[in-house]
């Protein structure tokens, strides 16, 4: 099951594709910005014997957003690192479907709890206006990187809910192990 968006209603599928495209663009530019920043830090430090002013502060924001946006992409694709051996052991499509539904349901519950806590955090941040905590040099409000947590968990919850909806809707046959990856077939 590679592209799950084709199992969604057309309008929702279009929204998911647009969100994923925007997220992927940010991840690409975020990685380039981080690499370029570290390159400039080395050039400034060893080439000019100077420091790049407050790069840690803008890098913090890029890293927060990069981490949570990429985590949301991983949630949609089901590409998070895991040590799940059951995927190789369970070959029955009905059991594979039930397992996928259970895991996605638990993932959704955990993500919703984390989204709730990030919502409480954002409400407190907004309530602190105009006395936001800020970074030392550039005076960037902590609201900015913390918003990444809120948006990231929101997207993860949204994608987990969509995956659960799709898994509940799909027939068990779609969860069958492809013939070319069946461990028993190679014996």
Image: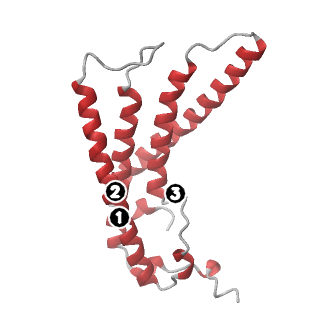
- Residue that mark 1 sits on: 106
Quick one: label 3, few (<14), some, or many (20+) residues within 10 Å? few
State the residue in front, 67 or 168. Answer: 67
Residue at the (41%, 45%) spot, across then down: 18
Q: Are marks 1 and 2 in contact (CB under 8 Å)?
A: yes
**Residue 44, image quadrant:** top right
Does 80 sit left or right of 126 as displayed?
Answer: right
Secondary structure beneath disc 3?
loop
Quick one: label 1, few (<14), some, or many (20+) residues within 10 Å? some
**Image location (x, y in percent) of residue 41:** 67, 20
Its colouring scheme is: secondary structure
**Image location (x, y in percent) of residue 94:** 41, 83
**Image location (x, y in percent) of residue 143:** 35, 27
- Residue that mark 3 sits on: 80
Query: How many labels, in total?
Result: 3
Q: Earlier in the sequence, mark 3 or mark 1?
A: 3
Residue at the (38%, 65%) spot, across then down: 104
- Can the viewer see residue 161 in this picture? no
Secondary structure beneath disc 2?
helix
Mark-to-mark CA distance, 3 and 1: 15 Å
Farthest residue to the left: give it: 127
Residue at the (45%, 47%) spot, across then down: 20
Check residue 110 in the rendering and tell me which mark sits there, or answer none.
Answer: 2
Farthest residue to the right: give it: 47
Mark-to-mark CA distance, 1 and 2: 6 Å
Does 168 sit left or right of 77 as displayed?
Answer: left
């Amino acid at each position: 099951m590679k592209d799950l968006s084709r199992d969604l209603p057309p309008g929702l599928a279009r929204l998911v594709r647009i969100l994923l495209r925007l997220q992927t663009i940010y991840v690409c530019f975020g990685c380039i910005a981080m690499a370029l920043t570290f390159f400039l830090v080395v050039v400034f430090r060893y080439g000019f014997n100077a420091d790049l002013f407050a790069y840690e502060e803008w890098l913090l924001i890029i890293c927060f957003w990069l981490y949570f946006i990429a985590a949301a992409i991983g949630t949609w694709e089901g590409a998070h690192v895991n040590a799940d051996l059951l995927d190789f052991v369970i070959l029955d499509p009905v059991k594979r479907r039930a397992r996928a539904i259970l895991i996605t349901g638990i993932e959704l519950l955990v993500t919703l709890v984390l989204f709730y806590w990030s919502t409480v955090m954002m409400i407190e941040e907004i309530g602190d206006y105009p006395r936001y905590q800020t970074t030392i040099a550039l005076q960037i409000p902590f609201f900015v990187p913390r918003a990444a947590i809120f948006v990231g968990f929101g997207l993860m919850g949204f994608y987990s809910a969509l995956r659960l909806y799709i898994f509940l809707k799909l027939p068990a046959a779609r969860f069958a192990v492809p013939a070319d990856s069946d461990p028993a077939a190679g014996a």
